[in-house]
Image (cartoon, helix red, strand yellow):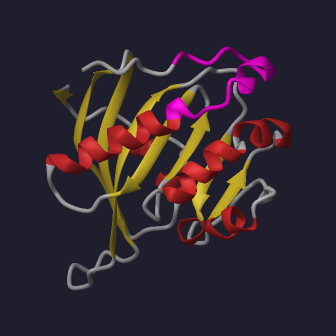
Amino acid sequence: MAARRPAGLLDTPFALFRRGAGVREIENTASGAHGGVHVIVADHWYAASSDPSLDDHERFTCVLSASPREWPDLAVVPEGLASRIASWAVPDIGTESDEFNRRFQVRSRDRRFASAFLDQRLMRWMLEQLPGVGFEVLDGRAIVFRPRITTSVDDVARALETFDGFRGRIPRVVGHLVAPIPPPPVATS
């Protein structure tokens, strides 16, 4: 992957980048092919205040890729993060899992798409992930994010593993509702 700073990345309308913050930044970006898909990997951090004496930073490692443009917008955001987003234009969609509903907010204008996307297998996988993992599909783009634990390359590897896990669990039925799903990456030894 090549290191670069994609222009306007912080201005994309993903919920992760929209919450109120005194200061925010995208750094440590790289782009290239991963599992046959073009991705951008970036660290995103924000702080509620711009006071440098406060340690109120939240840090995430994000993997962005293309998604079918026909897919409706869908945000599955951890509950704690969702409560800090100033305004949601769409109400929370509940799932059949009480545990999932406690940990995540699901937002989409297309309830049928959201329900098909969040099948039992994907929800179970998300519940097994590190708290703070989430994803969004928006305007032909997708982002999968997880809290940044260290400042090392390990966070990039973990974020790419999370991206692969997410991508490999997108239910095939979603493609029948809207547009075909690109195949998951083939594991090589």
Q: Residue at x 51, y 32 (%)?
A: 167
Q: Is residue 76 left or right of residue 89?
A: left
Residue 156 at x, y = what percent? 25, 43
Q: Which residue is drawn at 52% across and 62% down?
A: 19
Q: How many marks?
A: 0
Quarter of the rendering containing residue 136:
top right
Q: Is residue 151 magenta?
A: no
Residue 187 at x, y = what percent? 35, 21
* As drawn, 20 above or below 36: below
Q: Nearer the viewer, residue 143 or 187?
A: 187
Q: In this view, does 51 lie to the left or right of 101?
A: left
Residue 7 at x, y = what percent? 33, 33
**Outermost residue to the right:** 112
- In the image, the segment drawn in magenta is 167-183
**Outermost residue to the front:** 189
Q: Which residue is drawn at 50% across and 67% down?
A: 20
**Outermost residue to the bottom:** 53
Q: Which residue is drawn at 78% across and 18% down?
A: 176
Which image quarter is the N terminus in? top left
Q: Does the magenta stretch include residue 182?
A: yes
Q: Nearer the viewer, residue 45 or 53?
A: 45
Residue 63 at x, y = what percent? 38, 38
Quarter of the rendering containing residue 112:
top right
Which image quarter is the C terminus in? top left
Q: Is residue 75 left or right of residue 91?
A: left
